[in-house]
Amino acid sequence: MKNIPGLQTIVRDPAGAVIGLDFDGTLSPIVPDPASARIHPRALAVLADLGRLVGAVAIVTGRPPAMALRLGPGLADVPGLVILGHYGFERWEAGRSSAPPPPPGVPRAMAELPLLLDALGVRGATIEDKGRAVAVHTRRSPDPEAALAVLGEPLAKLAEKHALVVEPGRYVLELRPPGMDKGHALSLFLAERAARSVMFVGDDLGDLAAFDAVRASGLPGVNVCSGSAEVTALADRADLVVDGPDGVVELLGELVAAIRDRTPSGSA
């Protein structure tokens, strides 16, 4: 186990630890079609082990919880798992979901997007209906970076028109309601669980707010970047960089082993 103070605190006092993780690019490899993403094949076992040892495991994602559960068959069986979906607007725990009413601006923006993309001449862009948000992906475009540049200002205007905000990501721009982000969601969860330490693992720009929340919490903490060549901003702010979802699963496995070595009974 890496000699990082926040990690060492988690190992010494796992019952007080909250482990927060993004989904796409962290627990699941990035793929051209978001609907075909699948959780890393070794992630479920290590999350189940971790859930038995630490205070809480929370997946904090822009996806709806139902989608994360579909893309990660078996997640529902991870002990004590909480999914904070739609950046924290929707919560899944112990088989039950709760959320405020969906914002009316999302379906209105979605209805306008096909004509907007056609008018802009952006080829290969795809629209993802996320229920409480709508995302435009450019990964399949001939030039994904150029497509993002073309879309930036028009999507910002469309979001403003419908009282939404734009969340940038890895070849994606997402229109979603304001008032919540991963940092706010994580901060509320840390307070709810009376956490004594925290680790957050992410890979994309939307995870920067969670990194900030770890720092602002005042708790012993560690920010981990699931590294990629597409996004470097997180690596610059991370305490530890691992090699994508493979590295995330390996790190979590090392954490489980370190906790068990300190508590041979296998319980926190």
Image: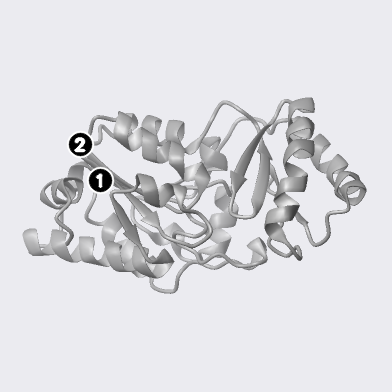
Residue 225 percent across, percent down from the top left: 38, 54
Residue drawn at (33%, 55%), measured in percent from left and top? 79
* Distance in Å between CA atoms under marks 2 and 1: 9 Å
Q: Is residue 125 visible?
A: yes
268, 258: nearer the viewer: 258
Residue positioned 87% across, 47% down in the render: 120
**Which label sits on residue 55?**
1
Residue to which mark 2 is pinned: 196
Badges 2 and 1: C-beta atoms under 8 Å apart?
yes
Task: Please state which of residues 237 and 50 is positioned toward the viewer in this rendering.
Answer: 237
The reply to whether residue 59 is in sight is no
Task: Give amino acid for label 1.
Answer: Gly
Q: Residue at x 74, y 27 (%)?
A: 160
Residue 54 to residue 78: above or below: above
Q: Quadrant of residue 102?
A: top right
Q: Amino acid at mark 2?
A: Arg
Query: Looking at the image, how many numbered discs can be counted on the residues?
Result: 2
Q: Is residue 46 above or below residue 63?
A: below
Crowdedness of circle 1 by 10 Å Cα count: few (<14), some, many (20+)?
Answer: many
Sort mark 2 into few (<14), some (14-19) or many (20+) by Cα contacts within 10 Å.
many
Whichever of labels 2 and 1 marks the residue nearer the N terminus, that label is 1
**Residue 41, percent across and down?**
44, 74
